[in-house]
Amino acid sequence: MGRFLPHPDDIPVELTLLKPECISRQQLHTISLGGMACNYHRAWRHGTALEVRMPTLNPDMRYLGYVAWCLRRKRGYLVGIAFVDEQTLFSARMGEQVCQIERYCRLHDSHDDLQGIQALALEWVQEHANEFSHESVHKAFAQPALD
């Protein structure tokens, strides 16, 4: 199974149940390409189909995923959401990249002007974009076949 990118806590995520879809543990383990992990206020059952949204960044951006795991934390749950096709995984990774850039710019809030924000975004891309590249998605997609 591929890796799960941590979603930044300061970017809200919405998880919506998709009924009646569900996937078995074995099938999910076999076809999952990896996905994202986010903190959430409630637990989800393994294999549950979810729609993932990040409305503060783009209300129209939606990803279909399945709960790969759900871990209890002190304040809520850490939910691993797996994606089962290469295009969804790549789109979700691009969405996560935007979230990470947004978070990076917030942490360096001394730059309020557009040029400063663009410079910070470029700095983040130069340091971290490889982790989100098409090649990295392709490796995650090919990995289950090699196991």
Image: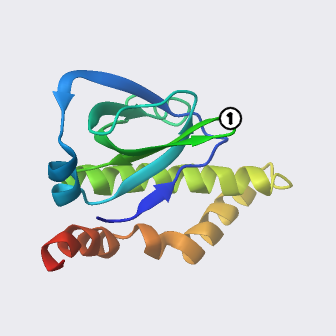
Residue 76 occupies quadrant: top right
Q: Residue furthest top?
A: 19
SS assignment at label 1: loop
Instruction: Name the residue that disc number 1 marks.
Output: 75
Q: Quadrant of the C terminus?
A: bottom left
Amino acid carrying label 1: it is Arg
Residue depicted at x 46% and y 34%? 58
Instruction: Assess disc 1: are there few (<14), some (14-19) or many (≥20) residues with their C-alpha within 10 Å of its C-alpha.
Output: few
Q: Quadrant of the N terminus?
A: bottom left
Pinpoint residue 14: horizontal percent, then vertical percent.
48, 28
Residue depicted at x 22% and y 47%? 25
Q: With 111 as the anchor, is 137 left or right in this view?
A: left
Is residue 139 among the parts visible in the rendering?
A: yes
Pinpoint residue 18: horizontal percent, then vertical percent.
26, 23
Residue 44 occupies quadrant: top left
Pinpoint residue 135: horizontal percent, then vertical percent.
29, 76
Is residue 86 among the parts visible in the rendering?
A: no
Q: With 65 as the anchor, is 74 left or right in this view?
A: right
Residue depicted at x 13% and y 73%? 145
Q: Nearer the viewer, residue 85 or 144?
A: 144
From this view, report whether residue 140 is shown above or below residue 42. Answer: below
Residue depicted at x 47% and y 58%? 5
Q: Nearer the viewer, residue 5 or 107?
A: 5
Q: Nearer the viewer, residue 133 or 146?
A: 146
Q: Residue furthest right?
A: 110
Pinpoint residue 16: horizontal percent, then vertical percent.
38, 24
